[in-house]
Image (cartoon, rainbow, N blue to C red):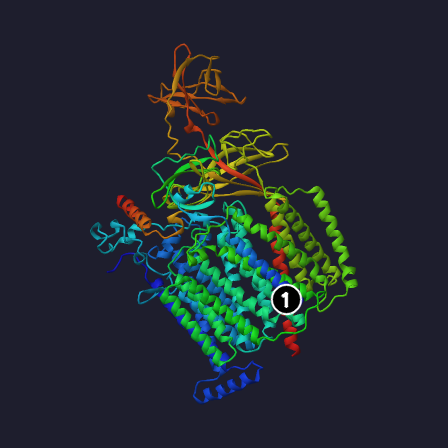
Amino acid sequence: MKKIHIFLLVLIAGAIGILLSSLNTGSSYGTIAEAKAKPGKFVHVAVQLDKSVPVEFDPIKNSNYMSFQAKDSSGEKMKVIYRKGEIPNLMISEKLVLKGRFKDDHFECKDVQTKCPSKYKDDPKAAGNSAAHNAATSEMK
Amino acid sequence: MDYIGEHLLPGQLGHFFIVLSLISSLVATFAYFMASRLGTGTPVPGISATSVALNKQNILAGFGDTASWKRLARIAFITEVISVFAIFVILFYIIHNHLFEYHYAWKHSSRTLEFKYLLACFWEGQEGSFLLWSIWHCVLGLILIKTAKKWEAPVMTVLSFGQFCLATMIAGIYFFNWKMGSNPFILLRDSGVLDNAPALHLDMDVSQALRPDYMLSIKDGNDLNELLQNYWMVIHPPVLFMGFASTIVPFAFAVAGLWKKNFTEWIKPALPWALFSAAALGVGIMMGAMWAYESLTFGGYWAWDPVENASLVPWLVLIAGIHTLLIYKHSGHSLRPTHLFFIVSFGLILYSTFLTRSGILGDSSVHAFTDLGMNLQLYMFMYLFIWLAAIISAKNFRQRVNSSFIAIILATLTYTLNLPWLGLIALLTGLGFIIYQIQTQVPTIAKEENTSSREFWMFIGSLVFFLSAVVITGKTSLPVFNKIFGTKIAPPEDAEFAYNSIMVYIALIIALLTAVTQYLKYKQTTGRLFWKKIWIPTLIAVAVATALFMVGEIKYTKKGPMFLASIWLAIACSLYSIIANAAYIWLGIKGKLRLSGGSISHMGFGMVLLTILVSSSNKEVLSKNTSGIYVNLGKDSKEEPGENLTLVQGLKTDMGKYWVTYEGEEKQANKSRWFYHMRFQRKDGKEEFVLSPSAFVNARGREGIQPEPASRHYFNHDVYTYITSLPDPEKNKDTASFVTSTLKTGDSLFYSKGFLIIQDVKQKDNLPKELFGDSGYLYEAPIKVYSKTGTSYSVTPRLAFAKGEILAVPDTIISESLVLQLQKINPDKSVQLGVKESDAVLKYVTLKAYKFPYILFLWLGVGITALGILMSMANRIRLNRQSAIKS
């Protein structure tokens, strides 16, 4: 066996090892119910902002603390606390992917990904509305 | 029905050229295919005999010969080039003239958009970016026609086929129910956007036809996404797509070699192309990083986002390919991996296209493209290229038939059974076939590489690059695996660290190899010679690294001492790489600039590694904070500070080594964008400057802010800040009311945060009659306000009586939330003063501020790397020309 083959095998084995171990991320996508069932486990939860409860954020008092209510597609709800400031575009988001762990009575959110329909995706309805809005304003002129 | 105000001609022309480009690229592919089938250029006797026989047959059948096929192919390709440029010009015309009857212009631009961003909105959409890619293929194709000589036909077959695939992406043609591609010339009224707008339909009923004058209502377009209104968006995509497009050339050469059974000669012309591609793709990627750093608020330049990874990975493999190619040129080894790396590199470009454009990254990336419902087509793009390469490189006719058969069976099965995992297996099988063909046909040297040879360690380096690409691809493909296997694995808690903890070792190994390997000779190196040269740079590197270790400071302790040690080691290795490569220019090649491309690019790469390591581990948060307004918690505070800090207008705030004051804001004309002026004052008084981070506020009628950072560059660090939150004007409606008290000059009055003293009450004389009328008067009451914080303010509320009306002009102290109003002047010269304390007057912004060290050197390193690669390219082109003249 050539020396280069030994290197080859070692490196490839290393790469496979790293890849397999990276599959064991210790995290998974789940629902609110699952997050509540396993407090302390790091999860990604796809939710929507529940606008029936006011969003709590007062930058004068604390510019890093934000709290709101989230609900998922099954209707399950939970309180979310985020300690990294205001989440951009939270109010217009159509979907949020929360990353964090459930603790006591709330979800400690480490990171959020917001999905805004009008920004990343064609939204015929919103576009139609804005076209209609344009139309309406031009009627008035 | 005829609609008023539409311009249909550009669209019709556009459609025509799209169809023309589709047909001409197909004709070019076929004609080039025939030309290279008939053409010689193959030294293998068996094949050339059959092709000569074929040649005769075809001539007899009146089928034409190589030259006429080639002529046809060139005509077809040039027609294709003209079509693509025509499409580009027409689409730009539509955007530039604001023809909003076209969906593309309506969706991506607006009347207020500055001219410089018209190009940016051109490639904001998928269609425009495919077009950009296609344009670069055109340019590269023309150069290949001019220079590739006997490789023209087979290489251009591959490239023309690539053009055909890209043309289908913007075709927008329906086959039965299946839509092929997305057409940029589709009309707004056909796009479905207007279907839900009753005001635009007859009788206000959406089931009716559109009103003939609907265009009157389409006043403006949807505008370019605010985040993309940026000069980086103008220049980054063209460069990146130039890199993307150019990777097809080394791929095409490798496939051409396998196809024509000429495994060795393509190396020479392919090398400059591969070098060009590496420079273009590398610069393109790093421009994306600069963009992210300068204008997006990711808080850095690299986040291991899937979109970033997807474009980095082909580059890593391409670099591996370039190095194995050099090994082959000098030692005859590593020809097989060279084929493989160039093929895989382009395959990964296609995979990255699939990842970023299919919408599969929806949950895991912040900046993937929109899903246009073209996933099948994007998959086919990969499938066809992989399998056609496999078929075309097959050893003989029987294998060609067999592999075609398997390709068709697998495709049919995947499609009819709709099994995603089968789709993956089908692709990997295709790749397996290519590897099999390379292994069975491409010659190799049985003799083992000497461990003291340069090629041995170059190969190890290439392998490390390749495997790091495999690891990154695997990690990035997590959403794909989830889709295929129905699993729900999410990225780990600290996703960036999951990459960094591996990549720091890759960086370490690569830095060490680039430092040492050039000092080795090809084939074999004698120990004495090696040490004689390398001891100088090694000693310097050790000295510098030790000095740095003593003086410097790496503050990245949060991942434990093990990781910190790895960072230190990697820093030392990249220093070694910089020094050793710089020294090699004199020690190894005696300062011959022409030959120093390799050393220069390695030196630049060492700099890139070094600055990445230093800057990302020494990033410093200036806006450290535990609550809103700055509170000094003292050194023993346990509470972990957040990174957001609220600054009240006019209030000096402590931020690291600066005092920062929010001075006010300014609106950009014609845009709903504001600039917020922050005055930074060094505490030692040595420096003062203003940074103006900006934000689009409620742009395009949408709630929310789109911030853009501002930074000040120094040679060894950047101060970098951006807005994270602004007060919501709705929430802060003024609800407080004035409390009135009667006071005389010299009287004082307490309010919640301090007290105030009336300085004087005076009546102004000589009032202009035209403003005040005959019996008008104006009183002023200068007041001194003493705040609890120790600051004092002077304000002057006024009361006027002008033309029969009483007018109070209040004065405010924003940082104290205080409004003072002069309400009445009594005959005894006492005044009624209204005092209001309201949050609504409190103007503030919340921001983050960082200090990034050595960012400038990162960009410099990238520049040097690219320069080195381009110097090598120039050198290789020169050498190729010389050898062409000799032969």
Give how far across and how far down residue B53 sits, in percent: 50, 88
x and y percentages locating residue B424 in the rendered image = 45, 64
Residue type marked 1? His
In the rendered view of the protein, which quadrant contains the C terminus of chain B? Answer: bottom right
Vertical placement of residue B77 versus B661, above or below: below
Q: How many marks?
A: 1
Tell me which chain the residue with mark 1 is part of: A
Residue designated by label 1: A5
Q: Which residue is depicted at the point 73% across and 57% down?
A: B583
Q: Nearer the viewer, residue B589 or B779?
A: B589
In the rendered structure, the answer to whether residue B872 lies left or right of residue B214 reads right
| As drawn, A61 above or below B94 | above
Residue B867 as seen in the image, left or right of residue B60: right
Q: Can residue B75 be seen here? A: no
Q: Position of residue B391 (x, y in %)?
A: 48, 74
- Residue B386 in view of the camera: yes
Q: Residue at x 34, y 45 (%)?
A: A74
**Residue B516 percent coordinates (x, y):** 70, 59
Quadrant in which the N terminus of chain B appears: bottom left
Vertical position of residue A35 compared to residue B475: above or below? above
Left or right: A101 as drawn, with respect to B209: right
Q: Residue furthest left?
A: B203
- In this view, the residue farthest toward the top is B828
